[in-house]
Image (cartoon, rainbow, N blue to C red):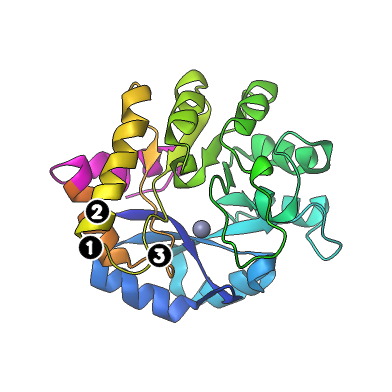
Amino acid sequence: MIIDAHTHIGRKYVIGNAKKLVASMDKAGIDVSLVFAGMMNDCPTERLLREIKPYGKRLRAVGAIAPLMPEGPTVDQAERWLAEDKVIALKFYVGYEHYFPYDDCVRPYLELCVKYGRPAIFHSGDLYNKVPGARLKYAAPLTFDDLAVDLPDLRIVIAHLGSPWPVDAAEVVTKNANVWSDCSGFVYGEFDEEKLAGFRHLVGEFLRVAESREKILFGSDWPICDQASYVAAVRTVFGDEAKDILCDNARRLFGIGV
Ligand SMILES: [Zn+2]
């Protein structure tokens, strides 16, 4: 089984739909993808839920929280998604929306994640420079340490190995039992030799600090990255079948059945 823990559908910045995602998964041999809603991608959670419904358990919704946007979901709405088991996690776009993960504005949503035992996934590291006003200070991996300490029962995913700060991300993951990281988003399209070398280097930096790879998740960041190429790159960089990265770690964290 292969689980892609980081994909998007959307109509702005990120352009992709559920049908194309499933076709890509078939080509790549991926069984389950977590699909992120995103207000900034013009794909709010309710829209995402409608679009992925025909694909059953192959696509698992990740709700998008936007605490500073008037059109963002209320705490009650988010609670309904969690209580009705419609979302497997919640996603937070800190650097694009300008709040720290430990800010009061977002705390009620994070407490819901604790209540329902669902992870909170945060964009971290580099920001897409076509999104106006994106600010790195909110997305730096070290900012997740405060949240991890404040809410020890919240399970946190730092996306993209916090790149270009994989050492910081690894330290936060290693120090805090409740923090994971995904290795998504390291290429536009398919890997070539140079991109593969860059990916290998960043993973090496992360593993130099992390004590184990138990808390690294495979994510591609489709449609930005090609899923089949990404699966091959993960196997090359992590060795053998990389079953822990491609499947076991995510299954444990998200409680995905066989
Ligand atoms: Zn992403």
Amino acid type, residue under disc 3 in the picture: Arg
Residue at the (46%, 44%) spot, across then down: 163
- Of the residues under marks 3 and 1, which one precedes in the sequence? 3
Answer with mark 3 or mark 2, whichever residue precedes in sequence.
3
Residue 116: numbered disc: none
Between label 3 and label 1, give the one nearer the viewer.
1
Q: How many residues crowd mark 2 within 10 Å: few (<14), some (14–19), many (20+)?
A: some
Q: Secondary structure at mark 3?
A: helix
Residue for badge 2:
196
- Mark 3 touches mark 2? (CB < 8 Å): no
Residue 7 in the image: state x and y as whole percent.
Answer: 46, 62
Outermost residue, right side: 70
Q: Quadrant of residue 101?
A: top right
As drawn, 65 above or below 19: above
Instruction: Specify the segment rendered in magenta.
Output: 237-258
Separation (CA) of disc 3 from disc 2? 28 Å
User: In the rendered structure, which amino acid carries the disc numbered 2?
Assistant: Leu
At label 3, counting other C-alpha atoms closer than 10 Å, the crowd grade (few under 14, some 14-19, many 20 or more) is some
Instruction: Tell me, for residue 58, which label it has, or none.
Output: 3
Mark 1, secondary structure of its residue: loop
Secondary structure mostly seen in the magenta stretch: helix
- Expressed as whole percent of the image width and height from the top left, the position of residue 224 reads 43, 68
Give the vertical position of 152 relative to 55 (above or below): above
At 47% from the left and 76% from the top, the residue drawn is 18
Looking at the picture, tell me which residue is in the foreground, 127 or 1.
127
Nearer to us in this view, 168 or 66: 168
Q: Kindly state the secondary structure of the residue where label 2 is placed.
A: helix
Q: Which residue is at 79% across, 61% downward?
A: 72
Query: Residue 192 shows which numbered tag?
Result: 1
Residue 245 on the magenta segment: yes
**Left or right side of 81 for 163:** left
Q: Position of residue 244 (x, y in %)?
A: 27, 39
